[in-house]
Image (cartoon, rainbow, N blue to C red):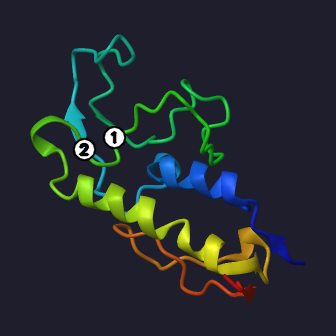
Amino acid sequence: MRSRVLLLGATTIALVASGATKATDLEPGVKLPPAVWDCSGGSIGGHVSGGYGRISFTNPYGQSIYGDADRFGVTRLHNPHLSFGQGPHFCLGAAQARLELRCAFPAPFVRLEDLALTIAAEDVVYMPSYLIRCPQRLPVTFRPSIA
């Protein structure tokens, strides 16, 4: 079964270019081990009561913010993700990464017509890494653009 790429056309390419960093909402490209805090005898935001010992922040998908947090939503307006960190731990390369996403992400959709996966999206196998998320193989078919 062929999976069609859903992002096609000049309007969609412009939308993707302007919102390319939204891809980091769903799955950050680089991950760090989850932070663990000792909260024995206390609470954090009223969500953890004493006796739990340690807690770990491990859910980057915000189910309480988005009912469909595991879906890629390039048109999503509320975007409080922490993919590039926050405060003193903000990624120094965030501006460059966003620029690269805006420039490079739309390019295949402009230059390659009828771009489509040759396997189902759920069959894509990813590299076995905790830090970086990328496919081992991404088999596609396309027709070179005349322009």
Position of 98 with respect to 65 (left or right) is: left
Residue lying at 54% horizontally and 30% vertically, measured from the top left: 77
Q: Residue furthest top?
A: 46
Could one spot residue 123 in this view of the protein? yes
Give the answer, above or below, for where 35 lies relative to 136.
above
Pinpoint residue 53: horizontal percent, then vertical percent. 27, 30
Position of 139 with respect to 84 (left or right) is: right
Pinpoint residue 124: horizontal percent, then vertical percent. 66, 76
Q: Give the secondary structure at mark 2.
A: loop
Work out how far the residue at label 2 is from the one at label 1, CA to CA, in angstroms: 5 Å
Q: Residue furthest front?
A: 147
Q: Are marks 2 and 1 in contact (CB under 8 Å)?
A: yes
Could one spot residue 30 in this view of the protein? no
Tag of residue 82: 1
Name the quarter where the C terminus is drawn: bottom right
Look at label 1 and name its amino acid. Leu
Q: Give the secondary structure at mark 1.
A: loop
Position of 20 with respect to 12 (left or right) is: left
Residue lying at 23% horizontally and 14% vertically, measured from the top left: 42
The residue to which callout 2 is attached is: 85
Name the quarter where the N terminus is drawn: bottom right
Residue lying at 49% horizontally and 48% vertically, measured from the top left: 18
Residue lying at 49% horizontally and 55% vertically, measured from the top left: 27
In which quarter of the view is residue 130 placed?
A: bottom left
Q: Nearer the viewer, residue 98 or 117?
A: 98
Tag of residue 36: none
Give the answer, above or below, for where 110 lies relative to 20.
below
Give the answer, above or below, for where 125 lies relative to 5.
below
Look at label 2 and name its amino acid. Gly
